[in-house]
Image (tube, helix red, strand yellow):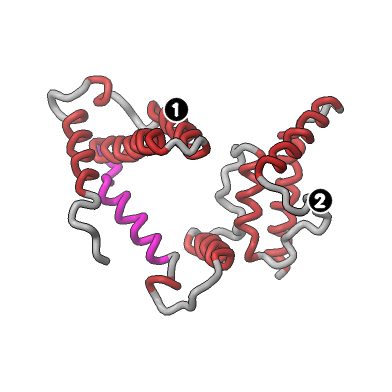
Amino acid sequence: MTIAPRQGQVFLELVAVMDRLRGPGGCPWDARQTHASLVEYLIEEAYESVEAIESTDSPAMVEELGDLLLQVVFHARIAQDAPGEGWDIDDVCQGIVDKLIRRHPHVFADDQALTPEQVEANWHTQKAREKGRASVTDGIPAALPALTLAAKVNARSQSVARARPTDQVILPDGIDATGLGELLYSLVVQAHELGLDAESALRMRVRQQIEQIRDIETNS
């Protein structure tokens, strides 16, 4: 795989800066951080990155993704310093490189080219197999916001026959993101007026869908 001469070189500078911050004579605040103490920053930077992407603010994306990347490098350096952890940024990078190659056999091996939908479905199936999971839905964080959880479960279950709900609400033809947002917001407002919690209701429905998917997988 050919990489442009400078592409990725600045990443090494970031690693060197983090080494200086965590090393002797570095920053006392950085030196005392742990995996646990950085969790709030990891979450914050992830959400700020999403906000920059959604606002199509390109300079903000550069800044926020840099902040998010810093969290990855920071955690790797903490692990490098901690007795018994025994991994560093090279292990993180090597792990994702190996995973990307392994899960794209249609690019790096002899598998035929697939549609994007088939690629995604095969990714989740192979992931479940690699991790020894009984279901493609295993490993989805239950604490995800309900809409994100629903989307994740749907994406994971595309390879499972008969997993798609049959009682779907049909959206109007030609609806766009703005129209969908209006529809979803209207549903939330109406649910509130009826004393219902839309978040909890969707989460309950997604749990039912997960159970259905697992039943299908068990009996297939």
Q: Residue at x 80, y 53 (%)?
A: 170
Provide the residue span drawn in magenta: 82-102
Report x, y in % for residue 145: 62, 37
* Residue 191: % across, % down: 81, 31
Q: Residue furthest right?
A: 194
Residue at image location 22% in from the left, 20% down from the top: 28
The amino acid type, in three-letter code, at marker 2 is Val
Give x and y (percent) for residue 102: 40, 66
Which residue bears the numbered disc 1? 40
Question: Which type of secondary structure does the marked residue at label 1 adopt?
Answer: helix
Of the 4 image quadrants, the one containing the C terminus is: bottom right
Q: What type of secondary structure mainly makes up the magenta span?
A: helix
Label 2 and label 1: CA atoms lie apart by: 37 Å
Image position of 75 (left or right of 138): left
Q: Amino acid at mark 1?
A: Glu
Q: Is residue 48 left or right of residue 30?
A: right
Q: Which label lies toward us, 2 or 1?
A: 2
Q: Image quarter for residue 121?
A: bottom right
Q: Which sits in the foreground, 181 or 49?
A: 181
Q: Which residue is disc 2 drawn over?
A: 169
Q: Residue at x 81, y 50 (%)?
A: 169
Answer few, some or many: residues within 10 Å of disc 1's Cα (few below 14, many 20 plus, some between 14 and 19).
Answer: few
Q: Is residue 16 magenta?
A: no
Vertical side of 65 occupied by 157: above or below = below
Q: Position of residue 185 (x, y in %)?
A: 73, 33
Q: Answer left or right for 169 relative to 37.
A: right
Instruction: Give the mark nearer the N terminus: 2 vs 1.
Output: 1
